Image (cartoon, helix red, strand yellow):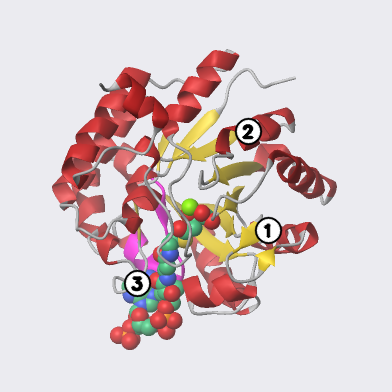
Amino acid sequence: GLPERVTIYEVGARDGLQNESALVPTEVKAELVTRLLDAGLPIVEATSFVHPRWVPQLADAAELMSLLVDRLGDRGRDLPVLVPNERGLDRALELGCRHIAIFGSATETFAAKNLNSTLDGQFAMFEPTVRRAREAGVDVRAYVSMCFGDPWEGAVPVAQVVDVGKRLFDLGASQLSIGDTIGVGTAGHVTALVDAFVEAGLGTEHLAMHFHDTYGQALANTLAALRAGITTFDASAGGLGGCPYAKSATGNLATEDLVWFLTGLGIEHGVDLDALVATSAWLAGHLGRPSPSAVVRALSG
Ligand code: HMG
Ligand code: MG
C-alpha cells in the first residue's frame, strides 16, 4: 500500500538557484524561503556553504542566513544548508545553523568534478565535518549523487551506490537522500535500489528520494518509491534546478507537480498549492522566464 502522509523536502532555494547564472539578490532569496515556509513546506533547504568560486550564485550564504535568522529566529537556524567540508561547517556554525547536509558522489568522475576529490577521498573530507557537526548538536543529512547513471561513466551499479550511500550515512547522518542527479532513472531501477538499501540494513525511514525530471520520469519514479516505502521526497519549487558540475542535469522534480500527484492519491503533504504556484510564478518573473513545471503553467494562466 501507499503511505498516508509524506514529507516534502524543498530544495528550490538551493538546488534550484545554484544553476542560475544571473545573480539573484539576497533579499529575493530571503523572500523565496519565507514564502515557501508560508506555503506549508515543512523543510526548506536555504543555501550552500561551498566555495564561492564554485557556486557564485550562493556566495551570499552568510548574508542570507543572517537575514533569515534575524527574521525567523529558531526557524531560520533550522533551515538546512549544504556543507562540503570543515571550512563550510565553520561558516554554518558561526551563524547558528542546526541542520547541515553533506553531499557525496557514487562515482569517481563526479567526485572529481563536484568536490575536487576522489571516491575514497571524499570520506576523509566528510568524516571530521560530520563528527564536529554532531559534537555541536547539529543534525546531518547526507546526499549521494549519480545513483542511477553518470554522464561520464554511464550506468552506475546498484551495489556501488549502496556501498557509498551506507558509508556516508554511517558517518553519523540521520537521513540519506538518493540522488538521480541527471534524471535517467526509471521505476524498476528505483525499486531495485531501494530494496538493495533495505537489504543492506538502511531502512526506508532513513531514506529520501531526490529526483530530477530530465527524462520526464520523476513522478513515475516517485510512485515506485512510495510503493517501496519511501516517505520523504525532495522537490524544487517551479521545477528549477540542476547541478552546474553535471552536464545534462536539468530541473528537479517540481514541487507543484509532486503536490498535485500526492493530492490525487489522497496522500497528506500539508502544502498550500495555490500559495506555492504563486511563489513560483513570482520567482519566474524575477528570473525572466516561465517555470518549467507543467502544474505551475496550468494553474498560473
Ligand atoms: P577545493 O578547491 O579542493 O578546496 O574545493 P580546498 O579545500 O583545496 O581549499 C581551497 C581554498 O578554498 C582555501 O582557501 C579554502 O579555505 C577555501 P585559501 O586557503 O586558498 O585561501 N574553501 C572554502 N571557502 C569557503 N567555503 C568553503 C570552502 N572550502 C574550501 N566551504 C570544495 C573543494 C569541496 C570546497 C569545492 O569543490 C566545492 O565547493 N564544491 C561544491 C560544488 C557544489 O556546490 N555543487 C553543487 C551541489 S551538489 C548537487 O547539486 C547534487 C545534489 O542536489 C543531489 C543530486 O542531485 O545528486 C545535492
Ligand atoms: Mg540535485
Instruction: Verify CB contact (< 8 Å) between mark 1 and mark 2.
Output: no
What residue is rendered at 76% in x and 41% in y?
188
> Between tags 3 and 1, which lies in front?
3
At label 3, the amino acid type is: Trp
Q: Is mark 3 within 8 Å of ligand 1?
A: yes
Q: Is residue 267 above or below residue 35?
A: above
Picture coordinates of residue 287, whole percent (x, y): 21, 46
Q: CA distance from mark 3 to mark 1?
A: 24 Å
> Between tags 1 and 2, which lies in front?
2
Q: Quick one: quadrant of the N terminus?
A: top right
Residue hosting label 1: 165
148 or 68, which is in the foreground?
A: 148
105 or 153, which is in the foreground?
A: 153
Determine if the magenta segment contains residue 81. Answer: yes
Q: Which mark is residue 286?
A: none
At label 2, the amino acid type is: Ala
Determine if the magenta segment contains residue 117. Answer: no
Picture coordinates of residue 50, whole percent (x, y): 37, 67
Residue hosting label 3: 54
